[in-house]
Image (spheres, rainbow, N blue to C red):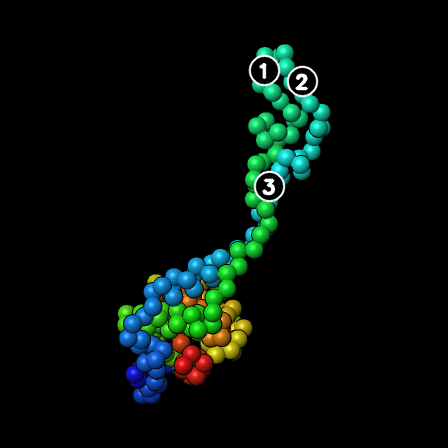
């Protein structure tokens, strides 16, 4: 399918660009692939550094608190018992990796499915490649207004890293900037509008097909 290419002023440039149907218009988007990819992405963000001290790791004496029989009280071992305040924790969390691995083809299917839903909802915008001479938040605010997305969460997808564009968007709560080679299913679904540059669309048409 062909879509119009806008400039950063929100005006039609008269140019169009092809969004391949095999990427942006799947006949049957795979919801389960999306679920698996998002779940794996979120799991992979976890540090897994949680740790609680167990009985053998708590500081304290191993002396038996009182004799086993004859006191009328429950049998008791040392002061590090999990039943006592300040004692160790039973089966506490230990450092571990939450990493999940998915096949490359499954992740690609998930991204295509997410892009298809975005395209059907009319939430994909293509603009000419642009850059800023220096970081300026006001310029990014103007672009959002010109594209009629001033109060919506939006993701600008660039072909390559551009510090001036990134720094211009950094202070805007509803705006993020990402390089196209770092695009993932979670990012596609998280934002209301996806603003692609021409070169980033060409990259996707080539790499995702």
Q: Is residue 206 left or right of 98 when viewed as pictured?
A: left
Give whichever of 157, 62 is nearer the camera: 62
Residue hosting label 2 = 66
For the point 53% across and 75% down, the residue is: 161
Q: Residue at x 67, y 21 (%)?
A: 65
Check disc 1: other Cα within 10 Å, few if <14, some if 14-19, many if 20+: few
Numbered badge on residue 64: none
Q: Which of the two discs, 2 and 1, labels the residue nearer the N terminus? A: 2
Residue at 67%, 36% in the rendered image: 56
- Work out whether residue 21 or residue 172 is closer to the camera in this orientation and state it: 21
Locate residue 28, reporting x and y percent: 29, 72
Figure disc tally = 3
**Secondary structure beneath disc 2?**
loop
Q: CA distance from mark 2 to mark 3?
A: 27 Å
Does any portion of residue 117 appear in the rendered image?
Answer: yes
Front one among 164 and 142: 164
Residue beneath the point at 45% across and 81% down: 207
Q: Secondary structure at mark 1?
A: loop
| Up-down relation of residue 20 to residue 135 (above or below) | below
Q: Nearer the viewer, mark 2 or mark 3?
A: 2
Task: First in sequence, mark 2 or 3: give its number.
Answer: 3
Asked which secondary structure carries label 3, the reply is loop
- Are the residues flagged by discs 2 and 1 in contact, CB closer than 8 Å? yes
Q: Would residue 190 be seen by someone viewing this image from the given angle?
A: no
Instruction: List the residue tagged with mark 1.
Output: 73
Q: Which mark is residue 52?
A: 3
Q: Give percent across and percent down for residue 33.
A: 38, 66
The first of marks 3 and 1 along the sequence is 3
Alpha carbon distance from label 3 to label 1: 29 Å
In x, y percent, where is residue 43? 49, 57
- Residue 116 occupies which quadrant of the picture? bottom left
């Amino acid at each position: 399918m062909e879509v119009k290419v806008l400039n950063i002023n929100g005006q039609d440039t008269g140019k169009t660009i092809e969004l391949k149907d095999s990427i942006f218009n799947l006949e049957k988007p795979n919801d389960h692939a999306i679920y698996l990819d998002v779940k794996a992405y979120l799991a992979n963000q976890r540090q897994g550094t949680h740790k609680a001290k167990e009985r053998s790791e708590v500081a304290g004496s191993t002396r038996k608190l009182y004799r086993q029989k004859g006191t009328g009280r429950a049998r008791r071992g040392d002061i590090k018992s999990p039943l006592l305040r300040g004692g160790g924790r039973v089966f506490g969390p230990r450092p571990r990796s939450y990493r999940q691995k998915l096949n490359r083809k499954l992740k690609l299917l998930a991204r295509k499915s997410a892009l298809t839903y975005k395209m059907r909802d009319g939430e994909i915008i293509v603009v000419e490649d642009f850059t800023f001479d220096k970081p300026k938040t006001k310029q990014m605010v103007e672009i959002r207004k010109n594209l009629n997305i001033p109060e919506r969460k939006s993701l600008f997808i660039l072909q390559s890293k551009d510090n001036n564009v990134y720094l211009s968007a950094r202070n805007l709560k509803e705006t993020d900037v990402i390089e196209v080679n770092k695009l993932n299913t979670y990012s596609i679904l998280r934002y209301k509008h996806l603003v692609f540059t021409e070169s980033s669309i060409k990259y996707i048409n080539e790499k995702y097909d």
